[in-house]
Image (cartoon, rainbow, N blue to C red):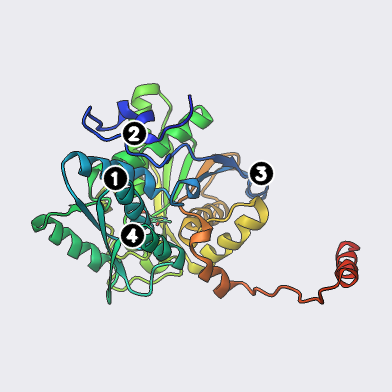
Amino acid sequence: MTWQGLIQHYENYLPVTENTPKLTLNEGNTPLLHFPSLSEELGIELYGKIEGANPTGSFKDRGMVMAIAKAKEEGSKSVICASTGNTSAAAAAYAARAGMRAIIVIPKGKVALGKLAQAVIYGAEIIEIDGNFDEALQMVREISETSPVTLVNSVNPYRIEGQKTAAFEICDSLGSAPDILAIPVGNAGNISAYWKGFKEYHEEKQTGLPQIYGFEAEGAAAITKNEPIAQPETVATAIRIGNPASWDLATAARDESNGIITSVRDEEILYAFKHLPKTEGVFAEPGSNASIAGVIQQCKAGNIPQGSKVVAVLTGNGLKDPQTVQENQEIEPVSLPNDAAAIKQYIEELTSH
Ligand code: F0G
């Protein structure tokens, strides 16, 4: 049967009723890709869960299809969220699909250009504030309590329900849970969703449980440091979050799975951001590469046994953030005359060594 999206495929695992609209943009069913080069380099068996292959280019589509379908089912006409970019892109797309209004509140100047373009083109109402994500989230939480708008940040439990399906897919692809699941941590919804998914699937199908390894950006590492960060900063704007809403669920995932939550420096993130596309042909956004950076870091520190089966979640597509490429990599094409002979000569020199 052809894939028809998460609500259809996983209806027995999701809070779906006969009144839930069968909303879909064909999200989910993303590739689990083996990484042969990095596996050899690190002495492990490494896979990437390519969430950038979702319809709006991030894992947020999994949660958003559920949250918006339920909002529609409940008769809501407008949804609201705070976002570092990907949540707003997903909210805007699914709201458009469902014939609803999306209102998004974003931190001014700190949302990658591709994500902002998505929100614009899908027709969202965009509000930017001179503040960070945590402040924006605080505002929309309060507003949604008294105004006729449904909150679709990951504090909405339907978001977590939709996002847990990625864990199901990993177990189905591998035949069981991996030894370690490495995942970026921002607002901490996704790490919580994966752990819920692994536990539920294990109960149903005895697929086993992974250790959860969560990675925050060092300048926004509230859980790692065990205190909120008032002014979070990182090149990985997706996870530039100083007071994660699902903090307690994330530490529960860490502790119950005998895992860790630690941080990676911006340099480590940028190294992974550039290394992954060159070695494996996979371009993921900076925030996503917190997982790869974390795996490299933990392998070097001897905290991941050789031969371990590790899945790194690559949460968002690299195309969303061309600025970070421009700012961190020289873009200098060789300029040659419009002349076949000159180009041929250049290529022959290139291929001669
Ligand atoms: N990776 C990407 C690409 C993200 O966009 C986010 C979160 C995360 C990882 C972290 O996931 O928040 O569940 O721990 N982005 C949110 C947003 C905050 O607004 O798009 P988390």
Kindly report the distance in space between the C-alpha atoms of the residues bearing marks 1 and 3: 40 Å
Which residue type carries mark 3?
Pro
Camera-nearest label, 3 or 2: 2
Place of residue 17 in the rendered image (x, y in percent of width and height, measured from the top left)? 22, 29
Residue receiving disc 4 = 123
Find residue 146 and report its image quarter.
Answer: bottom left
Q: Would residue 11 be found to the left or right of residue 293 on screen?
A: left
Considering depth in this image, is 217 or 57 the residue closer to the camera?
57
Kindly report the distance in space between the C-alpha atoms of the residues bearing marks 4 and 2: 24 Å
Residue receiving disc 3 = 36
Q: Would residue 350 be found to the left or right of residue 101 on screen?
A: right
Residue receiving disc 2 = 7
Place of residue 165 in the rendered image (x, y in percent of width and height, measured from the top left)? 38, 36
Residue receiving disc 1 = 98
Which residue type carries mark 2?
Ile
Q: Relative to 55, does residue 123 appear above or below in the rendering? A: below
Going from N to C along the chain, the mark reached first, 1 or 2, is 2
Place of residue 194 in the rendered image (x, y in percent of width and height, measured from the top left)? 37, 41
Going from N to C along the chain, the mark reached first, 1 or 4, is 1
Q: Residues within 10 Å of mark 2 (few under 14, many from 20)?
A: many
Q: Residues within 10 Å of mark 4 (few under 14, many from 20)?
A: some
Q: Would residue 42 be found to the left or right of residue 104 on screen?
A: right
Which residue type carries mark 1?
Ala
Total count of labels: 4
